[in-house]
Image (cartoon, rainbow, N blue to C red):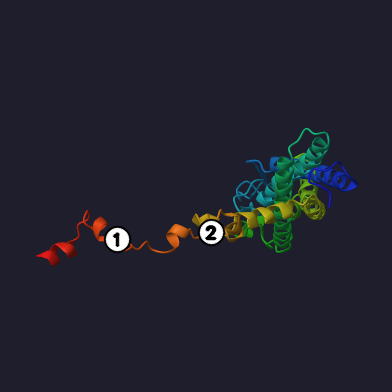
Amino acid sequence: MPHLGSKLTPHTIAIGLSSLILLALSIAILMLESRVQNAFTNDSRQYPGSSMAEFMFVPLNPSNIDAGPTVVKFAVGACSLLVSLLGIAWPVMHWSRACGKANIVYVGMLGSAVCIAAVTNIAASIGFTVYLFTSEAQGRLPKLFSQWGKQSFTQEFYLCKAVPSVFPDTNALYGFPACERSRTGRYLMLVICCVSALLAGLSLLQAHRDGVFAVFVKARLRRGPDMEQGRPGRANNDKLPQPPAMAHMPSEPGLSKPRVLQNMSPEKSQHRTSLYGFYGKS
């Protein structure tokens, strides 16, 4: 297994290229959706064949627009932009590490961030793409124009189905192909999902080769489950200083047996006093 922060390899270069593609896609979808918003102006056009007395006008920015799919496109574009920048920075950090300019800890932290961000982005992109295509497939246009206000429309449905049913030449109405740009943004979501999945897979594989996951597992085992409670972990119990075992005290000749007073001669005992002798004499 190569050490963390090794030099650039074809695998790390593939991560950088995938990140560049994802960066271009995220910028494209953000620009497309920003341009589409210019079609929704506070203006209206008279319904063809109606008179002023009937007061039938087609609003260009109706109040019953469902903004959910539009918010989803902006969210996926912004998240993909962030993930792509992290993915570009990771190979750069690998190269800096090979040149001795980057810390190995920072390379590992960036690799973990790229993996987490890429996996989260692909999960969110897939979920949002399913929601987006489902919302567009459920769109229905009422038969009567007077019923338009009772039903909500997505921006793409309103630009591509509702307004063209009244004004066939929508490009002249909006001044640019609003429907095509909105629809292109939706299909770009599929491409973003594919590139995000590729980037997530490459990032996880590179993190495994760098030993990023092994570092975290070893740190967790070294830390131990009891550290959060203020107690040393089980793995550290063997490393704690233990009190030395009681050494066997060698027996001294003078301490092995209690000293017993030997019988002293009467001459020597005269100079000693004892309670027994005192009470015996009395």
Checking the image for residue 247, the label placed there is: 2
Residue in the picture at 87% in, 47% down: 14
Which residue lies under the disc numbered 1? 264
Q: Would you place residue 70 above or below residue 261 in this image?
A: above
Q: Residues within 10 Å of mark 2 (few under 14, many from 20)?
A: few
The quarter of the displayed image where residue 224 is located:
bottom right
Where is residue 232? Give x, y as percent: 54, 56
| Circle nearer the viewer, 1 or 2 | 1
Where is residue 76? Give x, y as percent: 71, 49
Residue in the picture at 57% in, 54% down: 240
Q: Residue type at mark 1?
A: Met
Q: Quadrant of the C terminus?
A: bottom left
Under tag 1, what secondary structure?
A: loop
Residue 107 seen = yes
Residue 34 seen = no
Where is residue 228? Give x, y as percent: 53, 55
Q: Residues within 10 Å of mark 1 (few under 14, many from 20)?
A: few
